[in-house]
Image (cartoon, rainbow, N blue to C red):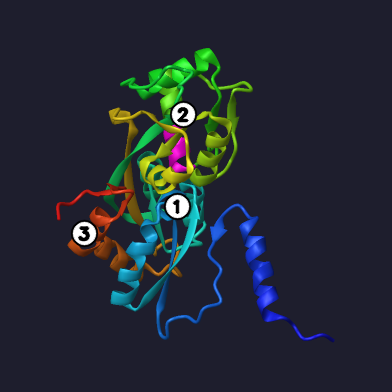
Amino acid sequence: MKPVNIKKTIAAICALFAMSVFTVSCSTSKETEGARVLKMATTTSTENSGLLNVLLPAFEKEHNARVDVIAVGTGKALKLGENGDVDILMVHAPDAEKRFVAAGHGVDRTEIMYNDFIILGPRNDPANVKGMQSASAALARMADEKIEFISRGDDSGTDKKEKKLWAASGVVPEGRWYMEIGRGMGATLTMADEKQAYTLADRGTYLSMKKKLSIVPLVEGDRALYNLYSVIAINPDKYPHARYDLAMEFIKWISSHEAMKIVSEYKVEGEVLFHPLKDN
């Protein structure tokens, strides 16, 4: 019998995860000795933007912990919480979050930061929506002209926001011009750019990818585009195995001056991606 090649086995496992419905970071590095592990389901926007890379190490060092991140759309993150598969959520769909807590799946929901959504499209703006004050009116115009629009279609916070905007416009988007791809924000922006189509994105992910894109913000500033992020601990009464104490340590820390200073100082291309709710 041939000896098992550990590196190849781990690589194969990572490949299988990459093809699954959510993304898990696979690593062969040695864990911090004695570190406690906090499983967090969060949105692709916090990971794609690079924020977690600067935010989490500070918590891990101070609290002798390791945060294992599962980056998915908010809908899938809430489902992971509902199944008791994680200890904490960092998400951005307030209505769905409140229903999640009301159903008894989560506790101690805490609002921490915000940015905004923007509608992006080609520079020549075939739908002629640039500068419109109403995001819903802009979408309605795209639908009237049947101008190609790429939707995440993945039940993420961004997807939920988009669906609310379509509902406000009075339009049910359908037809060949409207594509739901069931992918994360990065992939959606890439496809919209390749097709020179319109899409809705959170500003943080857009700024983190700006250098790679030719599509540009065309509709922004509408209050309906406000994008609020919260953290939620999984209810220990319903899921006794959840690491509630560590989740609460994280919630207290991320609400602190120290963490919010990291958030407020994190920039890409000279622009702040996320704004703390608390003054620093």
Tag 3: residue type?
Lys
Q: Earlier in the sequence, mark 1 or mark 2?
A: 1
Instruction: Indicate yes or no whether the magenta region holds residue 161.
Output: yes
Q: Which mark is residue 121?
A: 2
Per the picture, the main secondary structure of the magenta-coloured stretch is helix
As helix, strand or loop, the secondary structure at mark 2 comes to: strand
Tag 1: residue type?
Asn
Tell us which disc is closer to us: 2 or 3. Answer: 2
Q: Identify the residue at horizontal 53%, vertical 35% (top origin).
A: 193
Residue 11 percent coordinates (x, y):
65, 70
Residue located beneath label 3 in the image: 261
Which residue range is magenta in the image? 156-162
Q: Residues within 10 Å of mark 3 (few under 14, many from 20)?
A: some
Is any atom of residue 154 visible in this view?
no
Picture layout, residue 162 above or below residue 263 = above
User: In this view, which residue lies farthest toward the top?
Assistant: 144
Q: Identify the residue at horizontal 46%, vertical 70% (top origin).
A: 241
Return the residue nearer the eye: 134 or 78.
Answer: 134
